[in-house]
């Protein structure tokens, strides 16, 4: 076995055949370990940052969820009788929509008949999801009532 002791900044090693070898100590060995650790941490950080900036694929779930909400809301409003003459029930329709839909959902309600498009509740929506229902108005004219939903962001 080798046994070593320090003598005047030299490392003295004793070999198996009782001879002594003098070697200089390597003071930079610990420093190199620290440099290796820093380089590995930097590479790992850069790699994780690059991976975090990969764009996620678009999900159609939000639009599907909005479509379900729009159809449900039209069914609820129709069952309550508010769509028979929606101009008379604007406040009630707003209360029902505000209570059911989330705060970041914008809605627009329009009636399309032979006179054209007449807005009942008007909000500007980018890329809306639309659901519609056909109703016979009190004047016996057919009309399509369109509910458009979208998100605020």
Image (cartoon, grey):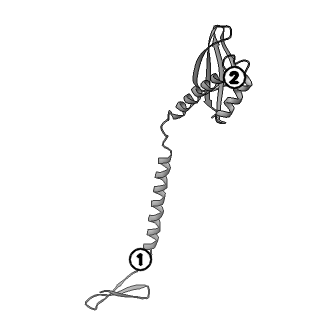
Report whether 67 appears left or right of 26: right
Name the residue carrying label 2.
122
How many residues crowd around disc 1 within 10 Å: few (fewer than 14), some, or many (20 or more)?
few
| Relative horizontal placement of residue 85, taking residue 17 as reference (left or right) | right
User: Looking at the picture, does residue 30 appear above or below residue 96?
Assistant: below
Viewer-nearest of labels 1 and 2? 2
Point out residue 17 in the picture as x, y percentages from the top left corner. 25, 90
Quadrant (top left, top right, bottom left, bottom right) of the C terminus: top right
Nearest the viewer among 72 and 116 is 72
Q: Position of residue 138 (x, y in %)?
A: 68, 10
Q: Which residue is mark 1?
A: 26
Instruction: Locate residue 27: give its quadrant.
Output: bottom left
Sequence-wise, the earlier of marks 1 and 2 is 1
Asked whether residue 127 is in view, the answer is: no
Please state which of residues 4 and 77 is positioned toward the viewer in this rendering.
77
Residue at the far left: name it: 17
Q: Residue at x 65, y 16 (%)?
A: 111
- Expressed as whole percent of the image width and height from the top left, the position of residue 99 reads 68, 34
Numbered tag placed on residue 75 in the rendering: none
Query: How much space separates mark 1 and mark 2, taking CA atoms?
Result: 79 Å
Residue 27 visible, this orientation: yes
Tell me which residue sits at (41%, 77%) in the image: 26
142 vs 2: above or below: above
Q: Is residue 115 above or below residue 89?
A: above
- Which residue lies at the image location 47% right of the left edge and 68% below the top edge? 34
Q: Are marks 1 and 2 in contact (CB under 8 Å)?
A: no
């Amino acid at each position: 076995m080798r046994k070593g002791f320090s003598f005047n900044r030299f490392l003295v090693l004793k070999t198996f055949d009782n001879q002594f070898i003098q070697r200089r100590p390597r003071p930079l060995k610990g420093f190199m370990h620290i440099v290796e650790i820093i380089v590995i941490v930097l590479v790992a950080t850069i790699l994780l940052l690059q991976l975090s900036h990969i764009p996620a694929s678009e999900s159609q779930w939000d639009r599907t969820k909005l479509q379900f909400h729009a159809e449900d809301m039209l069914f609820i409003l129709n069952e309550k009788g508010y769509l028979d003459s929606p101009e008379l029930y604007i406040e009630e329709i707003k209360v029902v929509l505000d209570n059911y839909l989330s705060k970041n959902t914008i809605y627009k309600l329009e009636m399309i008949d032979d006179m054209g498009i007449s807005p009942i509740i008007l909000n500007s929506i980018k890329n809306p999801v639309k659901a519609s229902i056909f109703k016979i108005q009190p004047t016996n004219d057919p009309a399509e009532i369109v509910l458009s939903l979208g998100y605020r962001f």
